[in-house]
Amino acid sequence: MLANGQTVIQQMEQWAPKRLAVPDDRIGLQVGTLNKKLKKVLVALDVTEEVVDEAIAEQAGLIIAHHAVIYRPLKALRTDLPGGKLLEKLIKHDIAVYIAHTNLDIAEGGVNDMLADALGLQDRRILSETMREPYRKLVVYVPDSHAEPVSEALFQAGAGQVGHYKECSFQLAGTGTFTPQEGSQPYIGRSGQREHVTEKRIETIVPASLERKVLQVLRSAHPYEEPAYDLLPLELDGHAYGLGRIGKREQPCTLRELVEDVKQACQVPYVRFVGDERQQVSKVAVLGGAGGRYLAQAKFAGADVMITGDVDYHAAHDALAAGLCVIDAGHNIEKIMKHGVADRLGSQLRQMGYSTVMVPSRIDTEVFKLG
Ligand SMILES: [Zn+2]
């Protein structure tokens, strides 16, 4: 069975929801439609002409890419210019393009976590927080017989996630009372007679963004016509999301050794670096893409070295003066997302029983050559 575009993107957005993206980022469906069955989905860093040709050859009806294909307001669609020609080709071959950019950088397990994993960073934290998501406390009263299936449904919908723990809840047994009124269709009891029912009070936690979904699931899993529940705001800090990661290497090493590791882990032939190559480094910050603006934050967070792409000359001087080593491994290190996205979504689709195949693009879209 082939998955349709909406199903694939639903999986993508459960992982990297659009609300995580920084303001004005160009994300989401940019070309074509998701309303079609997909044999293959190509995952690419950039949508270049070669990548579109690859999608055509692979018979992929959708490209999921990291960098936008339309990033300035489109004033004309001229097919005699490169940009318009690319869009024409996509449309002629019925290839849709969906972009997951900063939402995928920020998402847990997203581009920055993929890079931090590849570099073996442990005990890691977010480098630059972009948002906090408030929690709600959900308290629901369920007849004993349905306590397990209702909890299960709530957990499946995303309730009960606390840090590295999932399916967190508290249950307390008690007695519920109610008198069904005329016109009701009670699951238990008879109209006009007060009932006493052994119930469980289930308490769990829900991120604000999942509130509607969890309540929907609660109403359909709960056996009562009118489920009793409370939804309470919590004065907690909320769940933090952000760009970049900072963590420790298992063993301190020299900057030179780290340079070699970065080349291997990120599969790049060369890097540029700032700092004394004999210096010992252990605390490492990483941020895919243009990370020049986050060097001060990395230093402040105690990093010995920052690994990123697109660092300019003056930012590099500032880092050197501040005693922060920098490894500019190029913007292209974000290509790690091709396999990361294809593997994760591919196995999810397989588990759901779909035969749609996720293919990481084989095209290297690095634009710079060494002279
Ligand atoms: Zn990027």
Image (cartoon, rainbow, N blue to C red):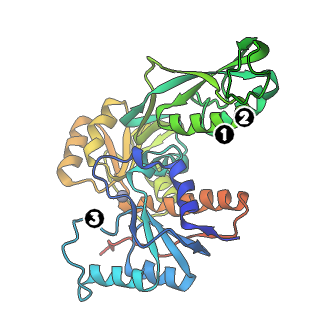
Outermost bottom residue: 80
Q: Residue at x 25, y 42 (%)?
A: 319
Residue indicated by mark 1: 156
Disc 3/disc 1 C-alpha distance (Å): 36 Å
**Residue type at mark 1?**
Gln
Residue 189 image offset from top left, x and y in percent:
80, 21
- Which one is nearer the viewer's eye here, 209 or 291? 209
Question: What's the amino acid at mark 2?
Answer: Glu
- Tell me whether circle 2 and circle 1 mark residues in contact (CB < 8 Å): yes
Left or right relative to 292: residue 344: right
Label 2, on which residue?
A: 152
Left or right of 293 on screen, residue 59: right
- Res 352 quadrant in image: bottom right
Q: Is residue 171 above or below residue 36?
A: above
- Mark 2 or 3, nearer chain start: 3
Q: Quadrant of the N terminus?
A: bottom right
Q: Answer with the quadrant where ligand 1 appears in the image.
A: bottom left
Which is in the foreground here, disc 2 or disc 3?
A: 2
Q: What is the CA distance from the residue labelled 2 to the residue labelled 1?
A: 6 Å
> Which image quarter is the C terminus in?
bottom left
Residue 328 point in image, percent of width and height: 34, 54
Residue 71 image label:
3
